[in-house]
Amino acid sequence: MRIVRAAAAFLLPCLLLAGCQMVESDSGGSSVAGTPPQAEAPFFVGRWAAEEKLCQSAAWEITAERLSTPGHVVCEFNEVHESAAGYEIDATCMAEVPPAPYTLAVFYAQSVGALLIEGGPFEPVGLTACE
């Protein structure tokens, strides 16, 4: 009987603790249990340039929501669809003309470490990552 009581005395607090959820603190250090982890940023997010030496003066800035080129083209992403080959992005791009819809195709050529973008108001381009 003592073993049963000892086991119950040990298991009850363990079960109660297991049912507790972590609460997010104001410092943002913890997350609520059951909350899915933040999605990893798409591979295209970052600074890119046609050549490494152009990273300081002529880099493309790409976030999860937009793309801007050194040639003053800006594309706002409306929808981003991941595919087996890369991403297809429905975007509204502004260049030297009024905003227009485009479907961008973004691929990463891992063998050469290059980002390939086509379908925008610019020629298809291969870019290298800026550090």
Image (spheres, grey):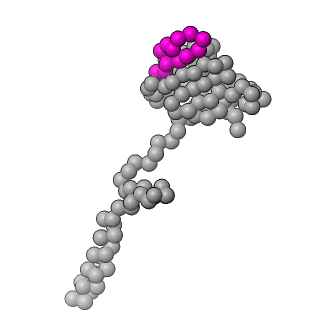
Q: Which residue is situated farthest in the bottom direction here?
A: 2
Which of 120/85 is in front?
Answer: 120
Identify the magenta region.
89-101
- Name the spot of residue 25 as percent of width and height, x first: 44, 59
Residue 80 visible (yes or no): yes
Q: How many marks?
A: 0
Q: Which residue is situated farthest in the left direction here?
A: 1
Tell me the quarter of the picture where residue 116 sits: top right
Q: Quadrant of the N terminus?
A: bottom left
Q: Residue at x 38, y 56 (%)?
A: 32
Residue 126 visible (yes or no): no
Q: Residue at x 51, y 14 (%)?
A: 99
Q: Residue at x 65, y 33 (%)?
A: 47
Which of 106/46 is in front?
Answer: 46
Which of 114/60 is in front?
Answer: 60
Locate residue 26 relative to residue 1 in the image: left or right: right
The answer to if 45 sits in the magenta stretch is no
Which of 32/119 is in front?
Answer: 32
The answer to if 92 sits in the magenta stretch is yes
Q: Residue at x 36, y 53 (%)?
A: 34
Tell me the quarter of the picture where residue 26 sits: bottom left
Locate residue 33 relative to residue 6 in the image: left or right: right
Q: Which residue is situated farthest in the top direction here?
A: 97
User: Relative to 109, does residue 33 appear above or below in the rendering?
Assistant: below
- Name the spot of residue 37 as percent of width and height, x first: 44, 48
Decide whether the magenta segment is chiefly helix, strand or loop: strand
- Name the spot of residue 40 as percent of width and height, x first: 50, 42
- Name the spot of residue 76 as percent of width and height, x first: 51, 24
Locate residue 66 relative to residue 109 in the image: left or right: left
Q: Quadrant of the C terminus?
A: top right
